[in-house]
Amino acid sequence: MRNRRPAYFLLFLALLAAPFPLLATVDFVASPLSSRSKNIRMFQAADTRVMLPLGYDRDPSAVASMELRPGTIEARVYTKPNPDGGVSSVELALVQGLTAGYEFAVISIDDGSATDGLDEIYKGLKRLLKAGRKAPRGKPELGYEMVRLGNIEADRALALLKALGYSTVEFSSNSKTREKVFDIKGDKFAELPRVVKVINDSKTSLLEADRSGSARKQTTSKSKGVQGAPKLGGSHLHSTTTGSPQERLLIIFDKNEPEALEKLINVLHTQIDVPAQQIFIEALVIEVNTNRLRDIGVELTGSKNHVQGSFERSEGNPLTTLLFSRESFTDFLSLKGKLEALVEIGDAEILSSPSVLVLNDRQARVQVGRQIPIVRSTTPTAGTTVKGIEYFPIGIVLNLRPRINLDQSQVTIQIETIISSISTESATKLEDGVSEDISFAPIVDNRLVETYVRVADGTPFIIGGLLSTERLESKVGVPFLSAVPFLGHLFSRKRVENTQREVIVVITPHIVPLETRNFSYLIPKDSDLFDRFDTRLFRNAYRVRDDDIWDLKFIRQSPALQSLLTHVRKSARDNVMLQRTEPFKGLLAGEIPGEAVLVRRMLRDIVQKLEFGQVIETEKVFFFESSNIAGAGVDLVDRGLDEVVAPVLEVPERAVLLTFDAQNEVQPGRFFSYPSAVVQDTVVPTDETEFVAFLRQMNPVDDQGRPLRWTIVLANSSDVAQLQRVMVLKRLLELNGNLRLSLQSFPRRAADFVSHTCGHAQTVPSYRRRSSAAFLRDLAQPVLPCLRTYIQQHRRVRRTLHEIFETMKGALKEF
C-alpha cells in the first residue's frame, strides 16, 4: 500500500492538470417560414444583417461541428476578436424542427468570452425572422411545368390531387357541336401550386362516333350491302389535325418555393402515375382422344374367270386371310376370307398453345378457331326469297383476369374456358347444305368452365374433365344372305366405334418484375432471321444478341455504389431539389456514372465482331492540317491518313500523334472553324501502365472536367483498325440517336452464356447427366485463356468507377 500512494498522488495531479472538456451552449430560434428555400435565404441573410453588424466574420476554413449532426441543413463558423487578444467562436446552423418546420441554432463554446455576444445574436435572429414574417408578400414569380402522364388518365389524377388538397383547374364543355367551347371549373386564384388539366383532342379516331348512342345493326340490302362496312369513299376528315400529346397536366408554381413543386411531382410520379405490373400467361390446350374401335366379322371375296365379287372394308390391311384356289377345289370359285377382331387406341393432340402478356387486374382474351359458313334464307315478302351466308364461330376461347397479391408470390386468376366444335353429323350436313345451297342449323358441342384459382408464381395448374363422347355403328354384308337369321353373321360384318375426347387446359402464370424492362419469355431467340443486310431500300440492321452484352452485375453490387446511392437517397429526402439536379437525378433513376463509356466500348466490340470497320477505306480518310507554307494563300491543307501512317508503321515503337484542339474556336476575321490537327512523330511506351499514363497526358482536361485537346495515337495496324471501328461507331450512334447509352438499355436475357470478354462465347452444356467435376472442366476450358484479359478489364472498370464515385461524393458535399 505504501508503494502505491505516490502513484495515486501523481494520477490525481495529472487529472487536475488535464483540461476539462468545454461545454457547448446551444440556443434555438424557431422559424415561422415553412419553405426550405426561404429558410436558406433567411440563413444567408443572417450573415449580413446579424453577424456582420456584431463584428463576426465567417471562417470558411473551419469545419462546423453541427455538420456531422443529423438534421442539419447548413452550418457556418464565425469568429470575433476579443479585447484581451482572444478569439470568440460561434456556430450558426439551420436545422430541422423537433416535429416540423425549421429552427436556427446558435452554438457557442463556453470559454468565458463568447457567451457575452450569444444573447445579441439570439435577439438579432428573432428580429430578422419577425421582419421576414411581417414582410409584405409580393406578387409570386410564376413558373410553369408541363407533366405528361403515362399510366393514368388526367381526370383520375386530377381527382386524386384534389382529394389530397391541391388546387385544381379543369374545363367543362358547353357545346354539342364539333367546335367545343370550354369554361373554367375551379378557383382561378387558388394557392400555388395549381394543377390545370390540359384539354385532350376532341377527336382522335378517323371513324365518326354514333351520336345517338345506339349500336348500328348490320342489315343486308341489294344496293348498300352490309351496313357498317367501310365505303369506298373513306371517312370524312372533318376535325383539325393535331399533333399534341394526350393526358397532360400543367402545373403553375412559385419559383421562390420550388419545394412545393417537387413534392407535387414526386407524388405524381411515385404514387399516382405508376405503371401496373404485368403477368405473362402461358396456356396449353390438349385434346386426348380415346378411340375404341371394335370391328368383328367376315369378309369374303371370290372370282371366276372374268367375274369378281367381294364385300370388304375399304381401308386397312387384313389380319387373317384364308385362300381357296383351283388346285384344291376344281372349277370352284376362288374365295378369300378374312376374320377380324381389332381394337385401336388414339393419342393426345395439342390444339393450341397461346401465350399473352396482360396488365395486373386486366382481362386478356385469347380466341383460336374458325368461322363456319351457314346458308340462310329469308322471305321478307311473298314470293321473294333472299339468300345469304353467315359465319358461325367455333374454336377455343380463354378469358383470363389475373391479380397479383401484395408480396408478389401468388396470382389469383378468374378463368373462363369455352371449347366449341361442330358435331360430325352437322359437319356432313353442312358440306351437303353448302353444296346444295340449302338452309341449315348446325349442332354445336360446347364445353364451358368458369372458376377462380390462386396459384404460386410460375406454377402450372390443370383444368380437366371437358369430355365429349360419340358412338358410330355401321354394318356391311352380302345382300339377302346377311339378312338371314343366325346365318347372316357369316356373310356380314359390324363396325362399332366409340370416340371419347377430353380437353385439358394447362395454364402457367409468370409475374414480370417491375424493374425488368424485358422478359425472357417474350424475347425471341437470338437468330440471324432478325438481322437485315444488303437490302436496297433499308439500312442494315443487326439485333444485339445476349452474348454481345457484358455481364456487369458486379457494378450494381459494388459496395461503393451502394454507399453512394444510400447517401444520395438520404440527401434527396431532406432536399427535394436534389431529385431534379444532375448527376443526382440520373443516379436516383438507376443510372450509373460513367456507364455511357462502358456501353460505347461494348458497341465497339460488336462492330469488331461484325467486321464493320472494313467498310472504312483508309485511303479515303483525310484530315486538315495547318499549313506552314508562306504565300500559299491558305492556312489549311488536307492530308490522307495513309500518307501519314504508312511511313511510321514500318518502324517499331514509333507512332503518329494527331492532336486536335477541343475548344476549336473561330479565329478573328473568319466565319468558320475547321478541326485541324497537329501531326507529330514520336516514340510511345511499350509498357501498358506507362502507355495509359501517356494517353492521359496527351488528352488533358481542365478543372471542370472539360477536355482541352484530343490526341489520336496510331502506332501499328491494330490502332488503325481501331480508328476504323470508332468511325463506324460514331455513325452508328448518330443513326440510333434515341438509344440511351445506359446498362439498363442492354440487360442480359439469359444466364446460360459464358462472358465473351475475350471475343469467345459458348453455350454452357447440359450438366444434369454429368458429374460436377466434368461440368466445371468443360466450363473453364474456353474461359481460362481469356481470364487474365477479363480480370484486367474489370479492374480498369472498377478504377474508373472509383474515381467517378469520389467525384460524385465531392459534388454532393458541395451541393
Image: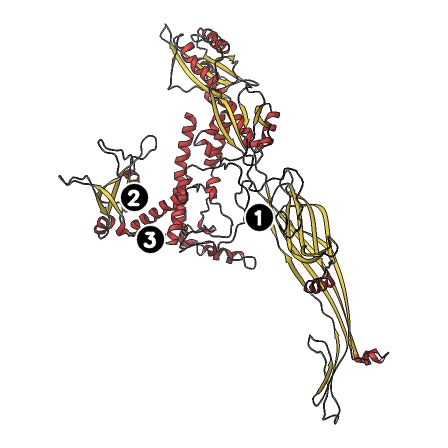
Q: Which mark is residue 691?
A: 2
On the image, numbered disc 1 is attached to which residue? 231
Point 47% across, 9% down: residue: 128
Depth order, front residue of 493/178: 178
Q: Is 667 left, or right, of 179 in this rendering? A: left
Looking at the picture, how far across and down is residue 363, in whole percent? 64, 44
The answer to which of marks 3 and 1 sits earlier in the sequence is 1
Residue extending farthest to the right is 485
Amino acid type at mark 3:
Val
**Do tag 3 and tag 1 residues touch (Cβ < 8 Å)?**
no
Q: Earlier in the sequence, mark 2 or mark 1?
A: 1
Q: Is residue 705 left or right of residue 335?
A: left
Q: Dot 3 surroundings within 10 Å: few (below 14), some, or many (20 or more)?
A: few
User: Which three-letter amino acid code belongs to the residue tagged 1?
Assistant: Lys
Q: Quadrant of residue 382?
A: bottom right
Residue 338 vertical placement versus 770 (above, below): below
Nearer to us in this view, 379 or 490: 379
Tell me the tag on residue 615.
3
Percent across and percent down for residue 428 are 71, 64
Above or below, comparing residue 665 to residue 459 in the picture: above
The answer for how far apart the CA atoms under marks 3 and 2 are is 29 Å
Residue in the image at 21% along x and 51% along y: 647
Q: Nearer the viewer, residue 560 or 94?
A: 94
- Residue placed at 69% from the left, 60% from the top? 288
Q: Nearer the viewer, residue 392 or 297?
A: 392
